[in-house]
């Protein structure tokens, strides 16, 4: 009999303590069984296996008893995935496994700004397996030391975790290497493979490739990496957005990727899914009795998803002009949050159960209509003696560009829970502030005894739940209360969970969580291909309409609150944008 244990994933060192003690990264320390503790959420699991055998090419485990059965459905059913089969190795010695992470496009902005710092943070926290190597890959010529020098400039330790920071950085950088090569050269990837093998030193290899490159070179890079530098164990590829620019190009991209990779090797990243408050959305909904019963058309009047940035497309105009704000923010980040917000309760926290529910709710949505969208583009503005450039002042943007840098949209979910509830989205660059939030506006209290105390504007008296994703992460509920005193004057106050006041820990960057999940093979926060198809089918018709009809965006000054049209759109559905109240 074999015994498997999985620790609760309260923090990385906790979740990985079994791994790091056993120094094998992905195998359970008792028997090298390839089960990630995080796969089962925070449940404490103790499971006894009576027998292990092969069935239909998959490893089959027969458990004898569990202490917590719910998250173990798959295992109880006895079927482990085929990918897990690859990493399954009865004879392997614990020390024989290693993970190599290759950042393809290592010389670029995202790699420097996000990927290397996130990898370092994981290293600092003890989240990376004992045997790991990081390689940067790009065309630029660089030595290992030059890469380390470049990377070192963007590494930081968290405010609350500074102990031995310099020492840890040194240790981390010693494990970073660089290989220069073309993205379409199998030969160059074979050279990378040779170097990876040297570092893997005969251990059982698992490899993660992070494609931090422009989308037009994804396929070449995937072809070369999969043909010339796949691992013995698992090979996974993180693909950055944009995943196409409409339904057709997205399907073509998926089709091309699937020539070389299986769906379970493809990790389509949407970094908003790795943000703390987005992760918390399901906890809020499904672990508090007070919210879920209110979560429907019966009590919710409208829901708003608002993204704003106080800077323009500076430096990324070339990329942006081909996509625009709807593809850059709405079709992915905001729609993903909407799906998590509106989905039905999943059967379990298993990745497939959650993604099934997301697909269902996306497929219940009405494709966005042209009448339900307004678009804007920022123009230059001078404030305090400083001139802020307009979108088309960017040299990489055509002077006559009609690409929207702002959009507002009204979407609808035609199912029993949400029938008739407007889901409003608003996203813009070069606005007055940087923020991302979800606003849930509740209905009026029927027959409210205090109506006369609210004056003429009853909307001011409705409850509003705000989930502020960034900055200053918070969840607050606007309620009505009495002002203390002898009279009866009403006030509106916030019941406020402000993260910085509640927790002294610094919140991890979204890329940390997502990289860790990709290393562990946890797919919950990555986009499945059918989710992607459903998301594109909602936006493709309107994107085509906007382009074919050459709809001219309404201009708004850099640093303003965006075009006035957004208010008219909301007003059509008797809604006021909560961020302007
Ligand atoms: N930057 C960001 O904030 C975000 C980026 N993304 C996505 O992440 C990916 C990487 O972004 P980012 O780092 O900004 O991209 P970059 O434009 O900085 O490109 C990354 C690297 O790719 C190589 N490269 C650039 N253009 C070409 C080209 N035309 N042909 C061949 N190689 C090229 C360059 O490396 P070399 O010349 O050395 O080969 C460059 O350093 C993109 O898909 C982007 O859309 C997603 C969200 C946010
Ligand atoms: O994906 C993207 O996201 C960033 C905003 O990310 P955030 O985590 O800083 O909020 C956005 O600036 C960029 O245009 C877009 O491609």
Image: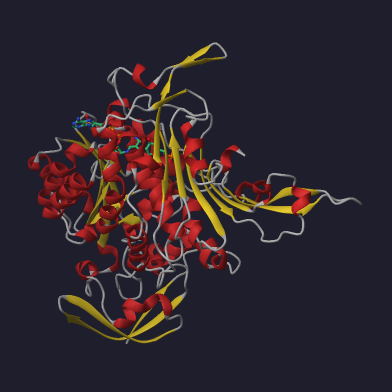
> Residue 360's image quarter?
bottom left
Q: Residue furthest right?
A: 486
Q: The C terminus lies in which quarter of the figure?
A: top right
In the image, residue 366 sits, relative to residue 543, either above or below, namely: below
On the picture, is 519 further left or further right than 161?
left
Q: Quadrant of residue 76?
A: bottom left
Q: How many marks?
A: 0
Q: Can residue 130 be seen from the camera position used here?
A: no
Q: Residue at x 68, y 44 (%)?
A: 457
Q: Is residue 472 left or right of residue 232?
A: right
- Please tell me which residue is depicted at 38% across the width and 43% down the height of the picture: 330
Q: Give x and y (percent) for residue 280.
A: 51, 57
Question: Can I make out residue 4 in this image?
Answer: yes
Q: How is the image coloured?
A: secondary structure
Q: Is residue 85 above or below residue 230?
A: below
Left or right relative to 227: residue 218: right
Extreme left residue here?
A: 187
Pick the residue in front: 364 or 78: 364
Q: Residue 399 at x, y = what percent?
A: 29, 17
Residue 342: x, y in percent?
A: 44, 59
Please tell me in which quadrant of the rendered image residue 369 appears: top left
In the picture, the quarter occupied by the N terminus is: bottom left
In the rendered image, the residue lying farthest to the top is 385
The foreground one among 48 and 534 is 534
Ligand 2 image position (quadrant): top left
Q: Give the residue at x 78% y 50%.
A: 453
Depth check, front residue: 178 or 532: 532
Q: Nearer the viewer, residue 431 or 259?
A: 431
* Residue 199: % across, % down: 22, 49
């Amino acid at each position: 009999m074999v015994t498997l244990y999985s620790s609760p994933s309260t923090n990385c060192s906790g979740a990985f303590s079994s791994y790091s003690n056993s120094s094998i990264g992905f195998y359970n320390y008792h028997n090298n069984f390839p089960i990630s503790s995080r796969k089962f959420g925070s449940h404490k699991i103790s499971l006894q296996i009576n027998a292990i055998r092969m069935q239909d090419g998959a490893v089959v485990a027969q458990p004898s008893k569990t202490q917590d059965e719910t998250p173990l459905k798959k295992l109880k059913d006895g079927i482990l995935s085929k990918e897990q089969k690859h990493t399954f190795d009865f004879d392997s010695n614990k020390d024989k496994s290693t993970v190599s992470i290759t950042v393809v496009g290592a010389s670029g902005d995202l790699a420097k700004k996000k990927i290397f710092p996130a990898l370092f943070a994981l290293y600092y926290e003890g989240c990376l397996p004992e045997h790991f190597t990081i390689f940067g890959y790009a065309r630029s010529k660089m030595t290992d030391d030059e890469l380390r020098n470049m990377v070192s400039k963007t590494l930081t330790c968290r405010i609350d975790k500074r102990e031995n920071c310099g020492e840890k950085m040194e240790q981390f950088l010693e494990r970073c290497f660089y290989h220069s090569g073309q993205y379409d050269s199998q030969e160059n990837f074979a050279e990378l493979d040779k170097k990876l093998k040297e570092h893997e030193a005969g251990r059982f290899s698992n490899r993660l490739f992070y494609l931090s490159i422009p989308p037009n070179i994804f396929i070449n890079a995937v072809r070369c990496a999969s043909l010339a530098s796949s691992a013995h164990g698992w090979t996974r590829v993180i693909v950055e957005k944009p995943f196409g620019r409409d339904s057709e190009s997205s399907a073509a991209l998926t089709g091309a990727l699937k020539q070389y990779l299986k769906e379970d090797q493809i990790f389509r990243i949407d970094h908003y899914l790795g943000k703390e408050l987005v992760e918390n959305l399901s906890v809020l909904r499904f672990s508090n009795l007070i919210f879920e019963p209110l979560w429907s058309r019966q009590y919710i009047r409208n829901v708003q998803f608002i993204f704003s940035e106080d800077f323009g497309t500076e430096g990324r105009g070339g990329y942006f002009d081909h996509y625009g704000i709807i593809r850059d923010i709405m079709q992915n980040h905001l729609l993903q949050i909407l799906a998590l917000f509106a989905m039905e309760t999943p059967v379990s926290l298993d990745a497939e159960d959650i993604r099934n529910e997301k697909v269902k709710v996306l497929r219940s949505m009405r494709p966005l209509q042209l009448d339900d969208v307004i678009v804007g583009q920022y123009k230059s503005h001078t404030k305090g003696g400083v001139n802020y450039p307009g979108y088309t002042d960017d040299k990489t943007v055509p002077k006559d560009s009609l690409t929207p840098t702002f959009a507002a949209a009204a979407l609808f979910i035609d199912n029993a829970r949400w029938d008739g509830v407007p889901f409003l989205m608003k996203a813009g660059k070069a606005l007055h502030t940087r923020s991302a939030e979800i606003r849930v506006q509740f209905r009026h209290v029927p027959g409210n005894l205090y109506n006369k105390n609210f004056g003429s504007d009853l909307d001011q008296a409705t409850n509003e739940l705000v989930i502020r994703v960034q900055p200053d992460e918070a969840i607050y509920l606007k309620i009505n209360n009495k002002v203390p005193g002898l009279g009866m004057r009403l006030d509106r106050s916030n019941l406020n969970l402000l993260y910085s006041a509640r927790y002294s820990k610094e919140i991890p960057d979204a890329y940390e969580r997502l990289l860790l999940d990709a290393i562990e093979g946890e797919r919950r926060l990555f986009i499945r291909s059918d989710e992607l198809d459903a998301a594109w089918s909602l936006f493709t018709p309107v994107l085509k309409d906007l382009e074919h009809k050459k709809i001219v965006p309404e201009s708004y000054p850099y640093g303003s609150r965006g075009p006035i049209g957004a208010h008219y759109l909301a007003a059509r559905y008797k809604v006021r944008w909560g961020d302007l109240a």
